[in-house]
Image (spheres, rainbow, N blue to C red):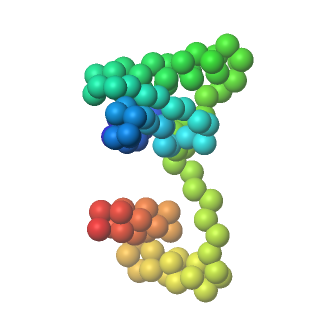
Amino acid sequence: MLVHKGYMGHVEFDDEMEIFHGEVINTRDVITFQGSTVEEIKTAFIDSVEDYLAFCAERNEQPEKPFSGKLNLRLEPELHREAYMAAKLNHMSLNQWITAAIRQQAQG
């Protein structure tokens, strides 16, 4: 995984074309890059992110930031109540409890 200014690039290798190609995966905007060596793909990734940021600046638009940390979540009312009760029993806010639960699942 490549990271530059908070943007994360996922790279794959196309063995037919013998080229690396990648895409920034933590934004809805499409940012792609490619190269034929590891150094080229790293440079292309950084250049693509910088080009995206410059393009946004030229248009006087805010670039999409990778993950704001805000998550809107819809739950069934009963599950909402259960999560709230579990949080209270653990002396946590609902936000803290959900964050801990997600972190635990993400770490396997």
Q: Quadrant of residue 18?
A: top left
Establish if 54 lies above or below 106: above
Residue at 58% from the left image edge and 78% from the top image edge = 80
Q: Quadrant of residue 96?
A: bottom left
Q: Is residue 81 left or right of residue 44?
A: right
Establish if 12 lies above or below 73: above
Q: Residue furthest front?
A: 16
Residue at 38% from the left image edge and 25% from the top image edge = 35
Establish if 8 lies above or below 62: below
Name the one closer to the observer, 89 or 106: 106
Q: The N terminus is located in which quarter?
A: top left
Q: Residue furthest bottom?
A: 78
Q: The C terminus is located in which quarter?
A: bottom left
Give the number of marks. 0
Residue at 34% from the left image edge and 26% from the top image edge = 36
Percent across and percent down for residue 26 are 50, 43
Residue at 54% from the left image edge and 18% from the top image edge = 51
Whether residue 100 is visible, yes or no, is: no
Percent across and percent down for residue 106 are 35, 63
Percent across and percent down for residue 47 are 45, 19
Whether residue 57 is visible, yes or no, is: yes
